[in-house]
Amino acid sequence: MKKTLAAALTAAFVVGATSTTLAAANPFSDVPAGHWAYQSVAKLASLGVVEGYGDGTYRGDRNITRYEMAQMVAKAMAKNPGGVGKAELDRLAAEFRDELDALGVRVSELEKYADKVIWHGELRYRYIHDKTDLKGGGSFKKTNNPLQLRFLPVAEVNDHWKIKARLTASDNMKTNESTKFDLTFAYADGTYDKFNLKVGKMPLYTDVDDGLLFDDFFSGAKLTFGNQFKVALQAGRWNVTDDPSSYQGAELYYDNDKLFIGGGYHHLNSDDFKAMYGKEDANIWAAGLRYNFGGNLTVGGSYAKNTKADDYDKSWTAGLSYKGASQKTPGSWGVSADYRYVGENISLAPTYDVYTLSSNKKGVDVGVTWSPILNTKLYVNYFWGKTLDTKEDTKTLFTRVSWFF
């Protein structure tokens, strides 16, 4: 983007309500009084939003980086603008959220300029085809291609607390049947130094095993303490099927962005487990290890066991990933390859997309991610292996495209 076309005029409009008079003189020699951007640049300079270069020039025709634009937004925010420029600052704060975080501008401060609510969202389309070759001949095939729309508001309560939620509506592209918007989760999120407390219905993701056990939602509370060494305690209710299960979990792990290692314990109690394997309880132990080689290559694995189940009572995975796609970086991409052994009596809601239509199988999962354009991400995974119970060959193709806004 150009400073004069995008940064200067947008920022000037944003901070316009804070300045009732223009600077007496424009300090930049390369923006004369007759220049079309003279007033905007003069106002920005008088407010300290732009500073130019040491030789007294503005150099408005050069391209600027997102980081430089974020610096200007941060300075504009410091002026506490209101009125006419408020909507523009809201959009800028949301767009440059990551860069502002890197500059040390707290997200809670950004949300103060957006009526204390910021909305994000995602439209995702998935195509999943699952095929199992039956031992008696023939094959069993199952296909699903859902469309889903998600709205994710974040509302600031005060400097320590936020309210986070997700509204979700789905459509079956095959049958043209749609659902109304449902409240997927809603919870209060409070942070005090190294303590974080969440209360309500919230995501349930097992960090230690990287989603080998759970990637779902539960109602209750979660307390996390620490920085690189972390302890996470959570308890509440989780639905196995229609019967709510009491749930308690604890995880301890170390994460320094290069090395991750940890262990966890999860206990559940429900009549559904009696139907699954004859006992009401599930006692699950898990451990995980990941290592980044200081660049784009990461290797890792995890293991978990349900000590109450007699069969299909363990799950494990091991693999590597190279690079990774980000919707904020068009052209970015990543590849991964993993071997997965997933037992149905322990991995109750695993994160793996190739297990969406069926579980209780082992095999190789290869994946590719790619961001073709800004705020868009494409996922493709292919799995081949065997079912754990019948030892039949099974294959799954998973594709997904997500548009973020």
Image (tube, rainbow, N blue to C red):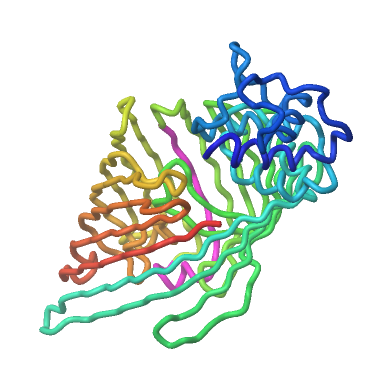
Above or below, comparing residue 168 to residue 140 in the picture? above
- Residue placed furthest toward the right: 20
Task: State the image coordinates of residue 26 (x, y, percent, origin top left).
Answer: 73, 23
Task: State the image coordinates of residue 162 (x, y, percent, origin top left).
Answer: 73, 46
Residue 85's image quarter?
Answer: top right
Identify the residue at horizontal 50%, vertical 60% (top origin): 281
Magenta part of the chain:
261-278
Task: State the image coordinates of residue 56 (x, y, percent, origin top left).
Answer: 63, 14
- Is residue 196 visible to us here? no
Q: Is residue 40 left or right of residue 272?
A: right
Q: Nearer the viewer, residue 182 or 12?
A: 12
Q: Is residue 70 left or right of residue 27?
A: left
Identify the residue at horizontal 62%, vertical 79% (top origin): 180
Q: Nearer the viewer, residue 53 or 115?
A: 53
Q: Nearer the viewer, residue 320 or 28?
A: 28
- How many numbered marks does the figure carry? 0
- Is residue 186 visible to us here? yes
Task: State the image coordinates of residue 185 (x, y, percent, origin top left).
Answer: 64, 61
- Residue placed furthest toward the top: 54
Q: Is residue 333 left or right of residue 251?
A: left
Residue 349's image quarter?
Answer: bottom left
Above or below, comparing residue 389 to residue 4 in the picture? below
Residue 201's image quarter?
Answer: bottom right
Above or below, comparing residue 280 to residue 223 in the picture? below
| Residue 348 within the segment the image draws in magenta | no
| Residue 273 within the segment the image draws in magenta | yes
Identify the residue at horizontal 58%, vertical 34% (top origin): 3
Q: Nearer the viewer, residue 238 or 312?
A: 238
Identify the residue at horizontal 63%, vertical 66% (top origin): 167
Location of the C terminus (image quadrant): bottom right
Q: Is residue 126 left or right of residue 186?
A: left
